[in-house]
Amino acid sequence: MSERASRKTLARRVARHRAAVGGAAVVVLVLLVAIFAPFLAPFDPGAQALDAGLSGPSWSHWLGQDKLGRDMLSRLVHGARISVAVGLGTVSLSLAIGLLVGSASGFFGGRIDHLFMRLADILLAFPGILLAIAITAVLGPSLRNVLIALSALGWVGFARLIRGQILKVREMEFVQSATAVGSPPVRLLLVHILPNVISPVIVEATFGIARAIVAEAGLSFLGLGVAPPTPSWGAMINEGRHFLFVAPHLTTVPGLAIMITVMAFNFLGDGLRDAMDVREASP
């Protein structure tokens, strides 16, 4: 089957997965909102109107205002930029490290593989969120430090996945044939092995973005995420929890944004996983 035919088959499989299509639509919408946030936000997210603090939804402020009178819709839109940046940034950094370590471990084996497995065991002994809290507490709240904290453990999952896939693929007939005709190790890895392990990595990356968004919201809720006054969905929930019964929109709006975005990435990941699994989906 040609590469173009394979892509068409994959697209048809994903299209039959209604939850995945819905998730993809929401993901695209969130990405567009994050990209064009400065043009979509009706107000400056930092502009205060103390006399209108805790106001509910109105024609001029569709999602109400927080305790300082800042427009919730504008802050929600700008908060999407942080969530998307952390999600994509964490997965990109984790994938880059995981690809390097996992490829070396799975392809070369020996001491490299043994060293990686021991390092992975040590890192996985720590709860991920606690390790992230410890790192951001030491480095201080900022977007860069959040990326470092979440990637410090995030790469392990990608490395283990890539290692396992390489161990399986390198025993296949076409790889053995390429080895027999004298294909150089680097070419063997880059041309014959890695292209055949990319499918589960894409699926894991989709789920990884969802996990990173939740983790960033948790860190921001604790005051360890991006530094104020930069809007963040987690920080918005923290600011609104004191007024839960007086102004419930302060917590429900960012909470729903997190829930919908995370569910969208998870639905998309489920659809991609089912579509790429030839044992469960037929062309």
Image: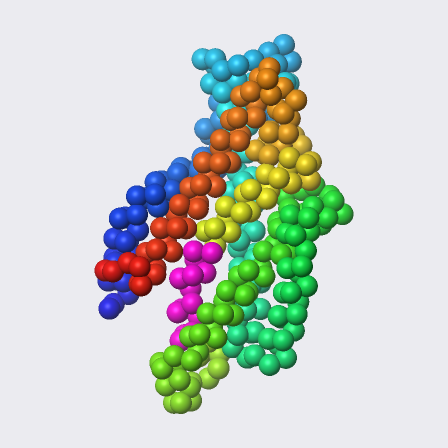
User: Foreground: 280 or 170?
Assistant: 280
Which quadrant, please, contains the N terminus? bottom left
Is 194 a magenta residue? yes
Residue at the image position 51 percent from the left and 36 percent from the top: 258
Q: Magenta residues?
A: 191-204
Residue at the image position 50 percent from the left and 46 percent from the top: 210
Is 167 a magenta residue? no
Quadrant of res 22: top left
Residue most extreme to the right: 138
Residue at the image position 49 percent from the left and 33 percent from the top: 257
Asked if residue 74 can be seen in this view, the reply is no
Q: Position of residue 205 (x, y in %)?
A: 48, 54
Residue at the image position 57 percent from the left and 33 percent from the top: 233
User: Foreground: 187 or 206?
Assistant: 206
Q: Position of residue 77 (x, y in %)?
A: 50, 31
Which quadrant, please, contains the C terminus? bottom left
Q: Position of residue 79 (x, y in %)?
A: 55, 34
Looking at the picture, does residue 219 appear above or below residue 61? below
Q: Position of residue 102 (x, y in %)?
A: 54, 69
Quadrant of res 51: top right
User: Foreground: 77 or 121?
Assistant: 121
Magenta residues, dominant SS class? helix
Residue most extreme to the top: 51
Looking at the picture, does residue 10 appear above or below residue 59? below
Quadrant of res 188: bottom left
Q: Answer with left or right where residue 168 lies relative to residue 101.
A: left
Total numbered badges shown on the rendered structure: 0
Asked if residue 267 can be seen in this view, the reply is yes
